[in-house]
Amino acid sequence: MWCHVCRQYTVQSSRTSAFIIGSRQFKIHTIKLHSQSNLHKKCLQLYKLRMHPEKTEEMCKNMTFLLNSAYHLALEGRPYSELRPLAELLKKCELKLVDQYMNEGDCQILIHHIARALREDLAEKLRLSPFLSVIMDSPNNDLLSDTVAVYVQLLTNEGSPNTELLSLQRLSIANVEGYLQAIEQAFSVIGLRFQELLVVGFGVDGANISLATRDDLYTALQKIFPWILCLPIMISPPHLEILDAISGKELTCLEDLENNLKQLLSFYRYSPRMMSELRNAAPTLSEEVESLGDIRAVRWIICEPNVLNALIKEYFEVVAHLKEISKQTQRADASAIALTLLQFLLDYQSVKLAYFMLDYIAVLSRLASAFRDEPLTVSKVQSKIEEAIQELGQLVESPGEHLQEFEDNFQDSFHGVELKNLRVAESKFQSIREKICNKSQAILSQNSESQSCLIAKACSVLDLSAWRENIEDLHSFGKEEIQTICGHLKTLPSLSDDRNGVNCEWQGLKFSFSSSGFKDIVSHVSAHKQRYKILRQVAQIVKVLPCSIICCEKGRAAILKTCKNHRGRLTLEQMDNRLMLAVNGPPMASFDAKRALDSWFEEKSGQSDAISTAMVVKMMDDKHQSNETEFYPDM
């Protein structure tokens, strides 16, 4: 048995006291004397100060310093344990802080209250936004492989779209029911019901969800929201998803190239001696190999253009080095592996396919970059997908930039090295190229649900850059597209199904543009609510549809930074709170800790002021519980 209060403040109390160490021989008289001792009273005073702080101006100021420090740590992905050294630095700068709230548990609590304030702000924004869209992303991290990050895109008071993190949720099972449950739980965190909201758009990254599951998820969402538009977003590079889908029996060459390239790089990466020799022989390739980290964990190395370019640039040097190793009889194991790798590097089809992959990746990389551009509209995204499909078709008809370079430079040898299997490989290569491009085109065209794709194309009429300058052309411009959009959204509760009315509004909008001009459709129709009752809502819906993935990339970067800086695994709640700050929080200079401070004081004042003698000097029998495991929950 021991005294819980004194045991928490061993600096102030005697560390050799039986009430700290623990004893089985306490008498009632001894316990009463301890409760009246000065040391116990001092510890009790510290305990009360910690559990029930008085909300004075000085206390608020001191706690604000700690909240700012905790916020900084969360933004930078730093561990909770760094709060104390950071606070000590602030004290060194003659800032007064509260010593009782500097440990790891306190830092977690402070971050929790900041996240709570941000969630309250988000809930209010969602209530004020007329429409919203949901974006779902599976973080590309092994520690969080069973989680999904749910984002929402909403309209601000100014009418501009804004994307924020809603919550990081555990995925119970990787099927439609599991994903829907995760979305519902994410909204319940801020006290909202998913089914009761006007959700008009849904986007999901395809790298971690199969096409079949995505289609089933679209169908399930359309049963809840008949008007919802399910659109493709690309947080991960699209070539990862596509190569996963197309590599198989018909295109075994892709997996062969991948495995051979991984074997080549691993041959150097996991041997300090080989790595040293590679630095001397091929410095550019050695840098790329080191930057990859664990090669076995890389999903598709043939999708790494820097690695392929470095290998092509220093191809002659790598081949020469492998030939040298293959002749060294004293290194039998390395010699045998080098001979196998030489067969790969001297194969005509492998070298030519590597060049083709550079052209192929370039097309899909340009498509992925479209989702990182600002501002971005849903119609522009759709046009970018169509452009990528056309470019893949062109790669079938004629060589791309890199493949043309190979054909121009290759005569009887490649960089002075004679390649093997020329006749067989050349006849097969065209067939391989066609299959890769055709299958990739099919997957890109399936990326978005057909009806949503049709509406996305129609949305181009709400982009002023597509409007005609000629008055006669402008008069007939966009009539069919507006009717297509309104026809799809007719089941939306807040939208009127007045076809004649929307035609009149559309003609009036074009007349206003030709006579006075305006820079943004949403801003203009929002400023004239009575004149454009239907078009205002249509424009808001189009504006809020999921397109940009900048917020999702910010979330992924925050996860990587946090996991890298934490040795121990964080709980889901801790990671969720940290992400909320990193993604939704303002820059450090703009952070206001007032709401988080109020939340912290509310929690402290919610506890009872009355502390019974039994709680203050609670004696526990240590027959069943170890001395090292007895603490107050918040300590």
Image: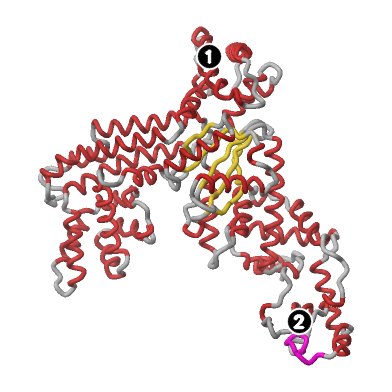
Q: Nearer the viewer, residue 498 or 296?
A: 498
Regarding residue 303, the answer to whether it shows in the image is: yes
Give the magenta range: 17-26
Front residue of 314 and 16: 16
The image shows residue 54 at horizontal and vertical percentages of 85, 63
Quarter of image, res 435: top left
Display coloring: secondary structure
Could you classify mark 1 by the number of other residues whose Cα lies within 10 Å: few (under 14), some (14-19), or many (20 or more)? some
Residue assigned mark 1:
479
Above-or-below relation of 83 to 505: below
Horizontal relation, residue 356 to residue 370: left or right: left
Q: Quadrant of residue 625?
A: bottom right
**Mark found first going from the N terminus, 1 or 2:** 1
> In the drawing, what numbered circle is on residue 620?
2
Quadrant of residue 36 within the rendered picture: bottom right
Q: Mark 1 to mark 2: distance in Å?
A: 80 Å
Say whether residue 516 is visible.
no
Q: Amino acid at mark 1?
A: Lys
Q: Is residue 212 left or right of residue 359?
A: right
Q: Amino acid at mark 2?
A: Met
**Which residue is painted at 62% across and 51% down in the image?**
580
